[in-house]
Every structure is written in structure tokens, then in C-alpha cells.
Amino acid sequence: MSLITILFATFAAGIGSVWLAAALMRLGWKDAGTGPLGRGAAEQHLLSLAAGALMATAFMHLLPEALESGRSAEPLFTTLLGGLVFFFLLDKAELWHHGHEHHHHHGSNGEGHAHGHHEGHAHASEPAVRSGGWAVLTGDSVHCFGDGILIASAFMADARLGLVAALAVLAHEVPHHIGDLAVLRQTSGSRRAALVKVSLAGAVTPLGGLVGWWLVDQLVAYLPFFLVVASSSFIYVALADLIPQLQKRLGARETLAQVAWLLVGIALVAAVSAMLHGHD
């Protein structure tokens, strides 16, 4: 697959999601409509849409593509299980690190909060400590680098699959970056500085795409396993990060809205895939 295409897609997913998040915050999406949902209703809709897009990409595209490679199902699903456990342990390590950092810097004064790369939007409304901004950016950069590798892996299998994967990453990074921008505005004291810092973290996504393109090209025989690892990442983010934020006691109207946006995410991925297949 063309490296230029991979770099363009990873740039759009990485930096484009930051700018889209900033634009939505400027329109008031972060604070508008707070009610029974506990946070901005529009942001909750984004979380639902992102969860649907990630699960649809994993179960309707990445996993089927890996299985069509002719590899035995057992090693592929073992890789899927291993990937889920790996991302669980990665989250645990980040929570431990930030919890330890919080205890070391603040003792018992009650300020600050743990903030892993998957928890940016979950804690964005809490008071942030000025010393925590670089920890947020470090975690975000690592996450973006991994996203770039996953997008490149999908592109190496099929261009249409790569575009769908980039769309799914874009969808889930927007609410994530909304949280990062909210935290960094408090730590840096400047909206512009926060946008520049998060954009730099997003710029790591094309770097991950470059590394992923080179790595998969060298290990092309293992491409189905790269696709399964990408699936495990998408599934883990959707089920362990996004959906738990939606699991609140809500009225029928709010619940239906969540389900509707979840289905919109699934339908969006399906529609893009069908459109791309129609151009064969």
C-alpha cells in the first residue's frame, strides 16, 4: 500500500481529530446540555457513536479479514485474547503510575486525579493539577503512536479496510481529545497552548503509521495477527473505556438516544464500507 496514503490517513485521524475536538468545544459541546447524563449530552452521543464505530470495524472488517487469510482460527483468537489482556494490563500500569505520581506530588491534600490515556475524557471535568499536563501528553502520544501502527496494518491488508480503521480511530479520538484539551487548558492556562500540545501528540499518529508500514512490510506473513491485535485494541477501548461511561441509570429518552447513536456508529462504518466496495 502507498506510504503517502497511509501518512495522509494517519494525519487525518491523529491531528484531524484534535482540531475537530477543539472546534466542537468552541461550539460548546463540552458543557452544553448537561443533565441526567452527568456530562454534555452531545459528548455522550459522540462516545456512543465512537463505541459503535470501533466495534463494527473490529467485528465486521478486521477480524473477518484476518480469518480470510487462511490461518487457523485458534492462533488468531488466542492472539485476540492476548491482545485484550495486554491492553488491560497497559491500562492498569498507567493507572498505577499516575496514582503513584499523584501520591508522590500531593500527599494527602486531595488535589489532582489519576489520568490514563483512556481516561482523558472520563476525568476531564475534575480539577487538574498543573504538574499533570505532560503525563497526559505522554500517555496520549503513546496511544496515538499505537493508533498509527494499527491503521497502517489495516491499509497493508486492504485500502478500504484502512480507510474504515482510520474512520474508527477518528471517531473515538474526538471525545478523547475533548477531555485532553479540557485538562491541558487548566494545566497550561491557555487555550492555544493546549491545542498546540495536543496537536503535537496527535502528530505522533503519522509516525506510528510510518513505523507500522515498515514493520508490516518486513513481517507481511504475520499481517493477519496485526489485524487481530488491531481488533483487540478497538474492542478493548469500546468495551472497557467508552461503554462504561454510558452505563448510567437514565430515563427512556436518554437510553434510546444512546442506543441510537451506537447504531449510527455501526451504520456509518457499514455505509462507508459499502460505498468503498461500490467503487471496485
Image (cartoon, helix red, strand yellow):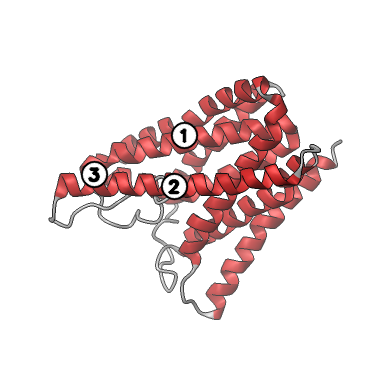
For residue 45, above or below residue 214: below
**244 or 26, which lies in front?**
244
Name the image quarter holding the N terminus.
top right
Image-based side of 265 in relation to 193, left or right: right
For residue 3, above or below residue 53: above
**121 or 142, which lies in front?**
142
> Measured from the top left, where is residue 143 in percent x and y?
47, 38
Which residue appears at 79% of the width and 40% of the height? 276
Within-10-Å neighbours for mark 3: few <14, some 14–19, many 20+: some
| Mark 2 → mark 3, Cα distance in angstroms | 18 Å
Residue 89 badge? 2
Q: Of label 3 and label 1, which has the lower sequence position?
A: 3
Location of residue 264 (image quadrant): bottom right
Which residue appears at 60% of the width and 23% of the height? 215
Q: Of label 2 and label 3, which has the lower sequence position?
A: 2
* Residue ID for mark 1: 202
Count of marks, rendered view:
3
Within-10-Å neighbours for mark 2: few <14, some 14–19, many 20+: few
Image-based side of 22 in relation to 165, left or right: left
Q: Of label 2 and label 1, which has the lower sequence position?
A: 2
The amino acid beneath tag 1 is: Gly
**109 or 40, which lies in front?**
109
The amino acid beneath tag 2 is: Leu
Is disc 3 placed on a helix, strand or loop? helix
Image-based side of 60 in relation to 236, left or right: right
| Mark 2 → mark 1, Cα distance in angstroms | 23 Å
Labels 2 & 3 near each other (Cβ < 8 A): no
Q: Is residue 239 visible?
A: yes
The amino acid beneath tag 3 is: Glu
Labels 2 & 1 near each other (Cβ < 8 A): no
* Residue ID for mark 3: 101
